[in-house]
Amino acid sequence: MEIKSATFIVSNSDYRKCPNGNKPEYAFIGRSNVGKSSLINMLTGNRKLAKTSIRPGKTQLINHFLVVGEEQRANHKEVTEWYLVDLPGYGYAKVSKNARSEWLKMIREYFLNREQLIATFVLIDSRIEPQQSDLDFVSFLGQNGIPLSIVFTKVDKQNQRETALNVNAFKKALKEEWEELPPIFITSSVSGTGRSKILNYIEETNKRLFE
Ligand SMILES: Nc1nc2c(ncn2[C@@H]2O[C@H](COP(=O)(O)OP(=O)(O)OP(=O)(O)O)[C@@H](O)[C@H]2O)c(=O)[nH]1
Ligand SMILES: [Mg+2]
């Protein structure tokens, strides 16, 4: 997969106002500050595409970015168009209770109703042990039949052994509820770790959709 371009299209507070049409979309969700917007920038190779911040609570709406990619098929190259969708974080403690429940409602409605949603990346901070809010969100997606994969973020901030400990603890927690584990990616938006694996996964998914 080669990214030809990535462009901001629109921000919304309501899934009903998100772009029409049948382009597939891939959503990024996780606790505030986990690195969702940074990962979108890393994948598209554009540091300025999605707004990031050292302070949690930066992304407050549903943001659609249109990506034009060139993908390798059996004997030709194919240009494909799809969306990356940046979302606010869940479990962000520093906004008012009211704002938090509005965000959560907006997010849940998006996931439950958005027909163009093909797959969801649930981002988990690789530096910390399993958090209940993350396990709860994975359960919500799983119980509603929404395809997901897990993306561990910020692995540049520690050594591989520490990452492996947290990844394994999270897998163990997932296995208590699920028979089969989702795809798992290990990433750093600083070093670019995991970029080609995620883009390959999107390419493979697109291939099935566009053929
Ligand atoms: N070292 C390092 N820092 C990262 C990485 N990913 C994100 N960050 C930093 O973490 C902070 C939060 O990143 P964002 O991408 O804004 O996080 P977010 O999940 O979009 O946060 P909200 O929009 O607030 O929900 C920023 O200061 C980023 O620079 C990473 O892979 N490595
Ligand atoms: Mg963000």
Image: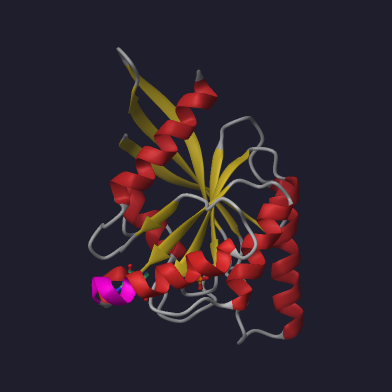
- Does residue 4 sit above or below 123 in this rendering? above
One can see residue 28 in this view: yes
- Does residue 135 sit above or below 112 in this rendering? below
Horizontal and vertical percent for residue 73? Answer: 35, 19
- Does residue 56 sit above or below 4 in this rendering? below
- Does residue 122 sit above or below 133 in this rendering? above
Q: Residue at x 70, y 77 (%)?
A: 100
Q: Residue at x 38, y 78 (%)?
A: 127
Q: Label the magenta part by its dominant secondary structure.
A: helix
Horizontal and vertical percent for residue 17? Answer: 71, 47
Q: Which residues are magenta?
A: 159-163
Q: Which quadrant is the N terminus positioned in?
A: top left
**Camera-side residue: 151 or 36?**
151
**Camera-side residue: 64 or 129?**
129
Q: Residue at x 46, y 81 (%)?
A: 55
Horizontal and vertical percent for residue 78? Answer: 37, 20
**Magenta includes 171?**
no
**Camera-side residue: 124 or 27?**
124
Residue 113 as seen in the image, left or right of residue 95: right
Q: Residue furthest top?
A: 75
Q: How many marks?
A: 0
One can see residue 125 in this view: no
Quadrant of the rendered image containing residue 102: bottom right
The colour scheme used here is secondary structure
Horizontal and vertical percent for residue 33? Answer: 47, 75
